[in-house]
Amino acid sequence: MSLADLSITEAAAGRRSGDHSFVDLFDAVLTRANHTEAQLHCYLVIDHRGARAAAETADGELSAGTDRGPLHGIPIAIKDNMNIDGLETTCASQILSGWVAPYDAHVITRLKEAGAVLVGKTNLDEFAMGSSTENSSYGATRNPWDTTRVPGGSSGGSAASVAVGSSFAALGSDTGGSIRQPGSLCGVVGLKPTYGTVSRRGLVAFSSSLDQIGPLARNVEDSRILLEAIWGHDPGDATSWNGDYPDISAPRVDLRGLRVGVIDQLSGDAFEEAVSDATRSVLDGLSDEGAEVGEVSLPGFDVALAAYYLVAPAEASANLARFDGVRYGLREDGATSEEMMRVTRATGFGPEVLRRILLGTFSLSAGYHDAFYGQAQRIRTHLTAEMNRAYEEYDVLVSPTSPTTAFELGARTADPLSMYFSDVATAPSNLSGHPAISVPVGLDEGGLPIGFQILAPAFGEERMFAVAAEVERLVGFDTRPVLAAELA
Amino acid sequence: MTRWLALTLANVMRQGTSLCRAMAIEIDIAHVARLARLDLDEDQLAHYGAQLDAIVAYAAEVQAVDTSDIPEMSHPMGMENSFRDDVVVPSLDRDQVLEMAPAQEDGAFLVPPSLGDEAEEGDES
Amino acid sequence: MTWAPVVGIEVHVELRTLSKMFCGCAVSFGGAPNTNVCPTCLALPGALPVPNRTALDSIVAIGLALNCDINEHSIFHRKNYFYTDLPKNYQISQFDLPIATDGWLEVDTGEGPRRIRIERAHMEEDTGKSTHVGEGGRIHTAEKTLVDFNRAGTPLVEIVSRPDIHSAVEARAYAQELRALVVELGVSDARMEEGSIRFDANVSIRPHGDSELGTKVEIKNMNSFRSLERAVDHEIGRQIGAMEAGKPIVQETRHWDEAGGLTTSMRGKEGSSDYRYFPDPDLVPLRIDEEWIERIRGTLPELPSTRRQRYLGQGLDSHSAGVLASSDADLRSLHDDAVASGADPTASANWITGEITAWMRRTETEPGDLDLDGARLAEMVGMVADGDLSASAAKDVLDGVLSGEGGPREVAEARDLIQVSDRAAVSEIVGSVLADNPEAVARYRDGEHKVVGFLVGQVMRASGGKADPQLANELLRAQLSG
């Protein structure tokens, strides 16, 4: 077994008992990347020099008696839509080509303070728009369980890298499922915390009211450690939660009497059989341990995805207006400023981004604003109230994370709507702002991972982690992707 | 495409298309591209126009919910009044700022001549 | 047919906060290009806005001073349009839920005060500045454009009036009154020449007596009160001319050409812009509660209109009240102190707006450097009222006081300017003058009453100019008739 396959807690303990150094951990991750990157393409850039220096510093500090905690010296990968001072941020787009971030995202500051070693920037669907990481202008990332298949998206580079061991854990961003869905497809834990609990400052905005940064990790405990390090109030983000935060230092739950609501709208025929089967077997396991499993109908989920595909593109159309060739990034020639902007934007954005800008612009335009954008925002209120009512009867809601396991590259690229349906189970939590986590619970007959989603009320992270840990224990999922297993 | 997906899609498209017809939605894709300041040729406009028709037909599902009396969501957690004190913090170094610029002159960002006020946002269609 | 002009004015006021509206860059004027910029005001990827609390205090103050309702709930919207000097290509502004609505501002063009209704005052951010380089520096002949983002993100309050203004003169009065108000509040430098206060006018005309509004034309680029008045005046004339020639008025934006003294069409505005407003998801709603409003109300200075009312209440005429109300703060407190020390308000105001202002102009003295306090002014006003000083002597005394020679009585005595208004003393002089001038006495008694003027002159001469001439006149007539 390689050091790259250790959990964060194991790696941290091993350093403190003198089994290995932090530089050893980084070298293990780098070796794994060297063996897998040609096939997977998880990273857009590996910061060899910076990461090694950080690992050396981490070793030095710890030897000198400064212990920054559980992430001290741990190699972490960062989705390339978060700024690291001095490194390029590309968002996998040509329009940002050559742009070097002059400041750290808030989460990066927090990780640096925690002593983490930032390995590099991972691949994504351009501006986080997609569910397969095929919409990267630098080429797709592939799934380490089957390299003919997608890793999911948009945080596909982060998810695949965690799965294969070219990082110990990673940060992703989740706007409609972009952490949980690739987590599910790559067999790792991915979670989106309550909206506002992780600062978005320095995260390149896709849809401001939906975007949340969150961890991808190989187990629930590692993801908890990472969330604890990055969340908290940031006065530099006006939407950052400034009230109390739940204590997630030691999540605990008694399964006996735990009320688990299975979302009707996300079960049955709408999902692949293997996915439904795996979900059912988890529920059986929970029942066996004393949980009260019931079914809950949330009709708002029937229109949630449609609402999502109105809100997200609308906000994106404004958020991406700043990419105009005036101040930074790509500039194409034009006789006038107006022409320069038009050509730059049409050239620099890929097809999915163009499509969503057009869609969002349309849904905000005169005559349609209220019927589309306005209606979608009212549905969010409606959906949230419906979910909150469900939480009066249930402690957590559950569903599969993704309707299917990993699909083949190119399978859904021709039809945008078919790709959009990948988010059907995940997008509602973004609309309501509630937290949700995806935990791997099994493999289908093709050996592809299946994810189980646990949804909790706002600020219900403690309960969410506790239930996720119980599911993890019940299932005992510790299979490694083929690629990692071969290398271990 | 899996069977479930094909069925789901067929179903929503049937519903959505009729909703779109009922709402008399017509997407003037060239106008939308102009608003979004995107230089798309005729083929691209036709391509994206057709895709938008399908997506909007699907998205029109939102009309099925009666939302009278329901307010639009603002902040998901209902936050209000998030401010900063009126304190000056150091600005970026100008060299660093201009290093990003595709073109610069005399400390300023250099761009091709501008047509002026809100050009193109006016009704050209 | 006679035509009634209808004018509404939109005002943009840059607030004088230390930092910008949504970031910590300094608000500055005239710095080297792009030296006050950061990720937020340059719209770098990932940057977020956080509203400046002081700027919101300022707009609440403006709203209250304009007698507006301060809405408990309001939100920031994104106004989407592309322009090179708008970094995000949307402006953070307010749309259907602005901070302040439904107020009024009183203006007086000399025909009595009128209330101009205020539709709204909302918070937004300023753009950067484009310099068009090329022949003539005109936008349409430019070869290239240079953009400086120092101004981008400066807090801006937009104040929109109802179309209640009926003339160019009134438009100017409204603009001046509004400028005085924001200056008084201390929220803006409001320098037209620096663009920190900017006026656009919406002008239309309609047949006298009609209630329906005519087609509206927006005029821009007025950089002084005079040019605002001229531009509105010209535009009203242009529209009347067009209507009478049977030409329709086109809804458009016109550019005021100061040198040419006319407005020229910029661009047709029919089918107006589609700004795709939506609530800014980077910002949370504002809730301005009673406590916040009362805190700001407690800091409001007395405003020009309130002050004018107060002066009118002291008995000042409309002109003096207006002049004094909008005069320098040092002069106003001189007046208030003098009145508090017992001076007649009208006399105090007349001295301040008349002789004292003239003296300052003559000696190039600033109001703050005047060597005069309210007590001394009151003393001098009192000496005139009591007859101790003649009006002309008082001017001398004032000059002495302002020149640092001491208090009014001290100066009057030193310069020997105290009027003799003691009845017995003057009576004695009158007696001796009559005795010395029998011829004049005889002529008076023959009915030549105008000779009394000569006798008053003799009394004044005999008294060394100090006798109260009125008293002398009275006593002369009494003794002559006796």
Image: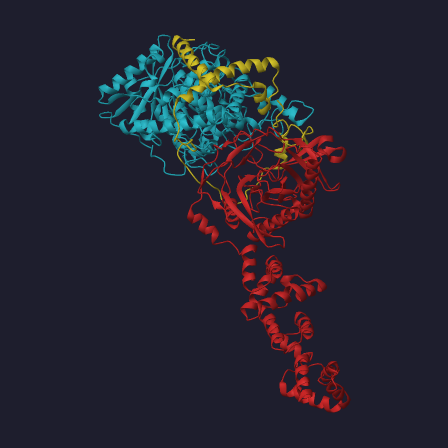
Chain colours: A cyan, B yellow, C red
Which residue is most to the bottom? Answer: C435
The correct choice, above or below, for C286 with respect to C467 in the image is above
| Residue A261 is at least partly visible in this image | yes
| Residue B86 is at least partly visible in this image | no
Query: How many dots with numbers?
Result: 0
Q: Nearer the viewer, residue C54 or C417?
A: C417
A219 left or right, relative to A38: left
Q: Which of the image's four quarters has the C terminus of chain C?
A: bottom right
Q: Quadrant of residue C125?
A: top right
Q: Nearer the viewer, residue A189 or B13?
A: B13
Q: Which of the image's four quarters has the N terminus of chain C?
A: top right
A79 left or right, relative to A473: right
Q: Nearer the viewer, residue C90 or A82?
A: C90
Q: Quadrant of residue A165?
A: top left
Locate residue B96, reporting x and y percent. 61, 34
Locate residue A453, reporting x and y percent. 35, 21
Residue at 55% across / 70% down in the picture? C341
Q: Quadrant of residue C383?
A: bottom right
The correct choice, above or below, for C371 with respect to C157 in the image is below
Locate residue C256, reporting x and y percent. 69, 39
